[in-house]
């Protein structure tokens, strides 16, 4: 059986803890593990813009002894020029793993079904699970053990980051509060899925419409762009609705005094996050961005070593 990482809950609580531990080990000794020696190639396919994901996977795969191979989504035309299934069969004969950023989660699942090698979600409309491993690693480093911590996610809760926080946070035994305007709250099914995990870990997932109530007492405060990739046409309308959910210093003041602020980037200062918050002392966003590399090295290593 080939293991994939398509959504945050593809890792059980014990597996997530193991991957986080491995990420910390790899961060301390970046060149010691070489599961891709050969070098074996890993395809990195992007159907949406990227900076951190391409660079952190590229550098990380090289550190693991492998060859990062960029596949331009525009040129490959997956699902347009040829079917997802056929692309999966072809890539699977050339590379040891496939990292794919695309729109539909169902396409990613189709790729995984037919590739015969591990497939990693490098962001879909629904989930961004690699980011969450990096985020949890960052919280571990700055705050401490994850279980029992309270996270407030404010802003566009219905996007990949909101969904991924619900699942990954609950897996880690955290209490995740999502605060979003009406119409931008994760689906009830996503809360149910997170709370089913939380029932086994002590974690929980709750919608808290009022941003002040959501942030009050939180150990971790998270936001994300109001306009995810693919939603650019809705920019103007979204900016009107999301105003009260902007992560300002006044809002952050309701969190624990030593709370940390996360943002997966790119950030829009003055919109979802104030400049004095993202550039302020509670922000750990640069460590978070660096941790993408360590987290993804751990994910790839884990998938390759646990078929
Ligand atoms: N929700 C954002 C995350 C960017 C890394 C997007 O999908 O554009």
Image: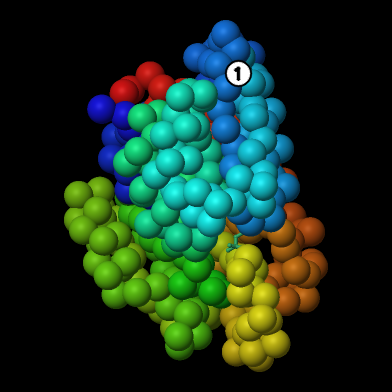
Q: How is the image coloured?
A: rainbow
Check the picture and name the quadrant holding the C terminus. top left
Identify the residue at image location x=50%, y=68%: 159
Where does residue 177 sit, x and y in percent of width and height? 42, 69
Name above or below for residue 215 compared with residue 236: above
261 and 87: which one is in front?
87
Identify the residue at image location x=75%, y=68%: 268
Quadrant holding ligand 1? bottom right
Determine which quarter of the picture holds residue 244. bottom right
Name above or below for residue 146 compared with residue 223: above
109 and 289: which one is in front?
109
Determine which quarter of the picture holds residue 38. top right
225 and 93: which one is in front?
93
Q: Locate residue 139 relative to residue 69 in the image: left or right.
A: left
Q: Residues within 10 Å of mark 1 (few under 14, many from 20)?
A: many
Name above or below for residue 36 compared with residue 114: above
Question: Is residue 232 in view from this perspective?
Answer: yes
Where does residue 46 sit, x and y in percent of width and height? 62, 48
Determine which quarter of the picture holds residue 59. top right
Residue furthest to the front in view is 81
Check the picture and name the quadrant holding the N terminus. top left
Identify the residue at image location x=66%, y=81%: 233
Dot 1 corresponds to which residue? 66
Q: Which secondary structure lies at badge 1?
A: loop
Where does residue 61 sit, x and y in percent of width and height? 61, 25
Question: Is residue 258 in view from this perspective?
Answer: no
Identify the residue at image location x=61%, y=69%: 230
33 and 46: which one is in front?
46
């Amino acid at each position: 059986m080939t293991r994939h990482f398509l959504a945050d809950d593809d890792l059980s609580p014990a597996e997530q803890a193991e991957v986080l531990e491995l990420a910390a080990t790899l961060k301390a000794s970046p060149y010691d593990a070489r599961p891709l020696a050969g070098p074996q190639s890993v395809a990195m396919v992007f159907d949406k813009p990227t900076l951190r994901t391409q660079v952190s996977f590229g550098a990380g795969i090289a550190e693991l002894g492998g060859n990062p191979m960029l596949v331009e989504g525009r040129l490959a035309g997956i699902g347009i020029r040829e079917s997802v299934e056929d692309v999966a069969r072809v890539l699977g004969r050339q590379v040891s793993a496939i990292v794919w950023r695309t729109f539909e989660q169902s396409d990613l699942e189709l790729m995984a079904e037919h590739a015969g090698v591990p497939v990693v979600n490098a962001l879909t409309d629904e989930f961004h699970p690699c980011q969450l491993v990096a985020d949890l690693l960052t919280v571990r480093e700055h705050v401490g053990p994850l279980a029992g911590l309270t996270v407030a996610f404010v802003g566009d809760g219905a996007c990949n980051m909101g969904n991924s926080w619900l699942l990954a946070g609950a897996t880690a035994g955290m209490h995740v509060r999502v605060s979003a305007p009406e119409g931008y709250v994760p689906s009830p099914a996503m809360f149910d899925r997170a709370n089913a995990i939380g029932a086994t870990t002590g974690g929980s997932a709750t919608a808290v419409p009022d941003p002040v109530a959501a942030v009050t007492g939180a150990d971790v405060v998270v936001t994300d762009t109001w306009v995810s990739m693919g939603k650019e046409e809705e920019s103007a309308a979204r900016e009107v609705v999301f105003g009260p959910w902007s992560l300002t210093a006044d809002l952050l003041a309701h969190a624990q005094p030593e709370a940390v602020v996360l943002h997966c980037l790119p950030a829009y200062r003055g919109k979802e996050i104030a400049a004095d918050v993202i550039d302020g002392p509670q922000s750990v966003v640069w460590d978070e961005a660096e941790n993408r590399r360590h987290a993804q090295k751990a994910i790839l290593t884990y998938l390759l070593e646990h078929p």
